[in-house]
Structures are given as C-alpha cells and as structure tokens.
Amino acid sequence: MHFTSQAPLLAWRLFRVRADAHGPVLASPMIHDPDPPPWEHATYSAACIEEAHPAPAAGCRCGIYAAVEGTLDSLPGYLLDNAHDEDPWAYAEVACTGRVFVDMRGVRAERAEVVRIALAEELWPDGDALAEAKRALAKRYGVPVGGLTAAPEWLTRNLPGETPIRADGRHGPPPDDAVLDLDSLQL
C-alpha cells in the first residue's frame, strides 16, 4: 500500500533510549550491531543494508518495523530477545508513509515519523532522571512524551513478566491458522 504524509498509517515501534553527545536518543533495539544507529531526528527513511533496492521490498526483511492493532507481531517479545540490553525502552507512535507492507507480523514502512513517545517510567533511576529524559526527548523530537499510559492497551497488555507474549506462550512467527482482517485495521 502507499500512504501519504496527509494520511499516514499510524503504528507503534519499540525503541531503546540511549545517550549520545546531545542527550537521550531513540535507537532500534533489534539491529545486531554493538553501536546501533540512533534515530537522530523525528523522521527516518528505510534503506536495505543487504540488497540494492528501495525499502521495504517483497521477499526481503528491510523496512521500518512497527505494529498496528490486529497484527500478531509482539513488540514486547523483542524485549525478551535483547534482555541483556540495560538501556531503558520506550514505545513510540509513528506515522508511516510511502510504500508500506502490512501482514500478519506487523508493518514494514518506507518512512516513519515519531508522533509521540511512551516511556517505561519504572526503568528510570529516579523522578529527576525521568523528568529530564522526558524534557530532552520532547525537545529533540518535537513530540509529547509520557508514560506507558499514553500507549494503547493492545500494545501494553503483553509486557514481559505480566502475561504471555502470545496465548500459546510462544514467540516468533504467527501460528499457521492466524487470519489478518485488513478491514478491521481501518487502513
């Protein structure tokens, strides 16, 4: 599908909140790199690091990953996959534009712009550090920054340590009998 900046697909992403020379910055948690590239600005464009084609592309894993209600991708599952990472995590709502793939596992987009940020407040050492992180992230990205109460319930209901990631307790690809109803996603 194709989404314009006037009518983007709103989805949610998982980030780690890391530090750079200018303060806290959002970074992708699943890039297997000792120093994952940060999202220095609110808008990010995808690039395929394996092939010379525009991202996202059919038959490739490239693109900006996110989830919408009704898809079975478990963003909290990524937290289990990189539990060794001690940087605090956050969800961000992103406006996906350009070429966008939507399937059972979620969204892969050509471009995404951060719309709002929801911090996992309990991961910050104290109230002052949390307040400073909220202030700095809001200034850097020009968006509202709140706690997990700003994220939708469908996204936060399966946080690690609360309920299973999926009803069958497994992670990874959706079950073979899963069905995606694009009409129910109000795309």
Image (cartoon, rainbow, N blue to C red):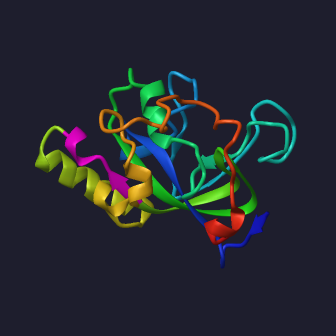
User: Is 5 located above or below residue 59 in the figure?
Assistant: below
Q: Is 135 or 9 nearer to us in this picture? A: 9
Residue displayed at 30% across by 38% down: 162
Image quadrant in which the C terminus is located: bottom right
Q: Is 59 or 110 nearer to us in this picture? A: 59
**Would residue 34 appear left or right of 102 to someone viewing this image?**
left
In the image, residue 38 lies in the stretch drawn in magenta: no
**Would residue 12 appear left or right of 5 to someone viewing this image?**
left
Magenta stretch, residue numbers: 117-124
Residue displayed at 48% across by 25% down: 81
User: Is 77 located above or below residue 143 in the figure?
Assistant: above
- Specify the quadrant of the image occupied by residue 138: bottom left
**Would residue 104 appear left or right of 70 to someone viewing this image?**
right
Q: Residue 120, how many percent across, how many down?
A: 29, 46
The mark total stands at 0
Residue displayed at 70% across by 45% down: 63
- Residue at the left extreme of this rendering: 127
Q: Residue 3, how many percent across, how many down?
A: 73, 69
Residue 141: in sight, yes or no? yes
Q: Residue 11, how many percent across, how many down?
A: 56, 59
Q: Is 147 or 36 nearer to us in this picture? A: 147
Residue 147: in sight, yes or no? no
In the image, residue 119 lies in the stretch drawn in magenta: yes
- Specify the quadrant of the image occupied by residue 7: bottom right
Q: Residue 99, how many percent across, how many down?
A: 78, 59
Image quadrant in which the N terminus is located: bottom right
User: Is 59 located above or below residue 46 in the figure?
Assistant: above
